[in-house]
Amino acid sequence: MLKKLFLASLAVLSVALFFYFDLDQKLTFSWLKENQEALISLVETHKPLSILMYIGLYILATGLSLPGATILTLAGGAIFGSIIGTVYVSIASTLGATLAMLIARTFLQDWVGKKFSKKINSINAGVEKEGAFYLLTLRLVPVFPFFLINLGMGLTRMKVFTFMWVSQLGMLPGTFVYVNAGSQLSRLESAAGIISPGVLGAFALLGVFPLVAKKLLDFLKAKKVYAKFKKPKKFGFDMIAIGGGSAGLVTAYISAAVKAKVALIEKHKMGGDCLNTGCVPSKALLKAAKHVHHARHLEDFGASVSEVKVDFKKVMSRVHQVIKDIEPHDSIERYTSLGVDCLVGEAKITSPWEVTLDGKTYTTKNITIATGAFPFVPPIPGIEKVNYLVSDNLWDINELPKNLIILGGGPIGLEMAQAFSRLGSNVTIVEMAPRLMSKEDADVAEVISKRLQREGVKVLTSHKAVRFEDEKTLIVQYEGREISLEFTDILVAVGRKARVQGFGLEELGVKLRGNGTIETDEYLRTNYPNIFACGDVTGPYQLTHMAAHQAWYCAVNGIFGFLKKFKVDYSVVPWATYTDPEVATVGLTEDSARESGVDYEVYKYKLDDLDRAIADGETDGFVKVLVEPGSDKVIGATIVGAEASVSILEFVQAMKQGFGLNKILGTIHPYPSLGEANKYLAGIWKNATKPAKLLVYLEKFHSWRRG
């Protein structure tokens, strides 16, 4: 604080002195012409001091964004000559620009970073990758006000040294033009005459040079990566998508919709994990379990049944029937009718433009890798002896597990824990972390944990699986003690790994990230510019709807990237856990906001106050919204409650379309409905931010009117 106060005082004093000595009046073109001889004489008499004073004044004017930098640049040439003047001005302008940048960073960076955190984080990500390139482009074209560039870069996290050398290099051509003009001051009629249309055009071309250079570098980089491969003269396809899950299906669909020639290759089942072993069967099982649970609690609503029996084989039969009913949506027949060539078998990428299948080679201009992920099985000692379940083979069982242990307290583990518990299994969740649902806030996890325990699920957090004693015994560690857990069945649900092996990526040299996913840029390109990746195989979100979202970018950037490329948009990403009650989130949570250093205000509305929730007997949960301080702008929302995955859509729309809690409060919601909770939450925000002082005066005003 003292540092800022000192710098602010120094800046104010410098500005005051600048205007006190009428430097704003003296630093004019006419004044410089009239006093050129006197200034040259002064420099010859007191050369070292004059040079220091000139450089100091230039730094001061530039650093504080004061008027006169152009005249000072001309003065450099008029007094010191073209070459020496260019050296002095180059040094002074760089130091001045850096000072301006540091002042902006000291006084404005934190405030701007907090108020516009999302945009600033995005800008900083771009600056980190290509900041020097863009700064150089801006510096080379003198039509951009340099003081704005200085201040703008101060708000980013660009390194000071990078800013200095790029600025010096970028400003050098313009500096020389002005200094050289100053050396011929007697011939000039005004400063405006320095930059003629021809000179300005030359600068514009100079500014375009980095863009051209970047394109050239990209071309050379691509040429290098393609060097060992022979590019076909003709192509059979515009796009080949490998993987028939959500990512591959949408890539193929979009490509075919714009009349591109596209092939989709799937080695197992169309629809991928979501249809066959993930979203669809799990939701069908959850629905069956929910009906059983409601039947067992009919007495709460004044009804009763003598006994609720679960025929697990019938439950699983319905699960598989649901899959069959949805299969046509993702079928070969449907996608063939849409214009996609659907191929079955194990694909292998043999070159950036070639894919082999059953001994036949297919050529393509672009490839999209959409191979998804598979359940991760941790190397727990003894696990190889156990006939464990994962999300892939869980749907093959026909007998209800008697004692089921679930490893993992994430969405899959919790959904299956509740489903099997309601169907009659004794379920134990083993989670190594201190709480369930590590991606959500603690208050969210608490609601779900209490609900599961109330329904009979045993929740063991901070318990680490250390080994399997035998085929039916798991040893866990808790607070330094070892505990033995018996089971009849065990479900491993600790995460998923990207499917990146067995189809040519290793031989091709496609780069992977440290977590094993395919490395892609903001256009979803791999290190081969015509090979894209989307969905679970690249991340960062392992969500079906995100895979479909990314697929659009793969298709469009692949088919039309030679004209225009689009950066993938992760600005508003919702997700849901389909426990009962459901959990749905979009944007920031309190935990993620704190970790990111984002300031926020939080408002919460509990569902035990909502008429419809009370009528339905669904009062567990709440609506929680994060907004920018002093604003109604939503930066994150979480709903815990019945149909949360539906209710969250209002906040998703608010964040995407840019309207806030005021608009939600002013929108009519049906009564009685669960969606009203969103409006009541907005009402809590409105009440908390009401203008208290104004209301005091209003009260007095109304009192005066009543007499």
Image (cartoon, rainbow, N blue to C red):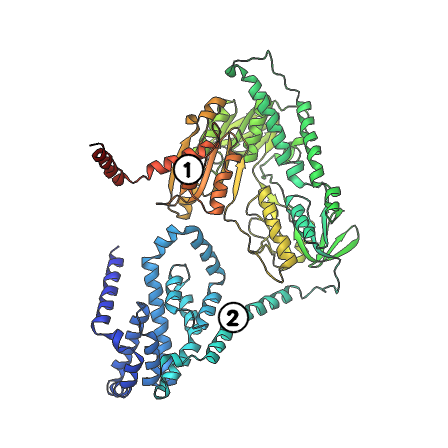
Q: In which image quadrant can residue 609 be found?
A: top left
Quarter of the view holding residue 101: bottom left
- Closer to the chain start, of discs 1 and 2, is 2
Disc 1 versus disc 2: distance between alpha carbons?
49 Å
Does the CB distance between marks 1 and 2 fall below 8 Å?
no
State the SS at label 1.
helix
Q: Which residue bears the numbered disc 1?
A: 665
Identify residue type, mark 2: Pro
**Disc 1 crowd, CA 10 A, few/some/many (<14, 14-19, 20+):** some
Which residue does the image show at 24% across and 71% down from the upper left?
Answer: 18
In the image, residue 472 sits, relative to residue 73, either above or below, namely above
Which is more foreground, mark 1 or mark 2?
1
Residue 92 position within the rendered picture, expressed as x and y whole percent measured from the top left: 34, 74
Q: What kind of element bears circle 2? A: helix
Q: Which residue is drawn at 40% across and 66% down?
A: 149
Residue bearing mark 2: 210
